[in-house]
Amino acid sequence: MNGDAVVEALCQPIYFDDIPLQQVFTTPGRTITEADIIGFAGISGDFNPLHVDEHFARSTPFGGRIAHGLLVLSIASGMTTRLPVFAALQPALLGMTSVTCSWPAPTRIGDTLTIDLVFTEATVTRSGTKGLVTEQRTARNQDGVVVLESTWSLLVARNAGNVTA
């Protein structure tokens, strides 16, 4: 396949029936900055000293400030939505129904995160016109340490050509 064909294939919309199950899609890296943490504290109102007070945070088991867990989740969300596979899914994406997550290790200022996105399950709903898609988003820092594990459930439309009456 030549380069033009690859770009054209990537730009084609995908629907529920086209979900590439069990394939790993990895984002480019993004470094977490102090500005990210301060900005998120301002937007969310979460000024917990663990995130914004270096003197206090040095006295904790973390030994310094760490990023808000919800900041890491938000950044992971934004990074994965820019993946070509997720962009192709946009025309069929009807919404998110749930997300669960855990933070097995802290994210620190200066950490560079990459996110792995894997669609793990796809189930047609009773209506037959859409389905629930489960995906895993895992964030790792520059050392390969997992800092976020999350499971997302998305409602995705089926291609009208695949729906039988």
Image (tube, rainbow, N blue to C red):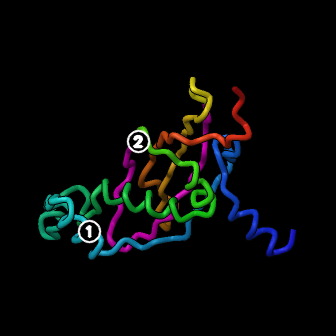
Q: Secondary structure at mark 1?
A: helix
Residue 101 percent across, percent down from the top left: 39, 43
Residue 162 or 31: which is nearer the viewer? 162
Q: Which mark is residue 99?
A: 2
Tell me which amino acid carries mark 2.
Val
Q: Is residue 42 shown left or right of residue 98?
A: left
Q: In the rendered view, would you say 28 is above or below 158?
A: below
Q: Is residue 44 shown left or right of residue 160?
A: left
The residue under the point 47% across, 54% down is: 146
* Main secondary structure type of the part rendered in magenta: strand
Quadrant of the snapshot with the N terminus? bottom right
Part of the protein shown in magenta: 99-123
Residue 111 percent across, percent down from the top left: 40, 69
Tell me which amino acid carries mark 1.
Ile
Q: Which mark is residue 29?
A: none
The residue under the point 21% across, 64% down is: 43
Q: Is residue 17 magenta?
A: no
Residue 94 percent across, percent down from the top left: 49, 45
The mark that comes first in sequence, 2 or 1, is 1
The residue under the point 17% across, 67% down is: 42
Residue 2 percent across, percent down from the top left: 86, 73
Q: Which mark is residue 37?
A: 1
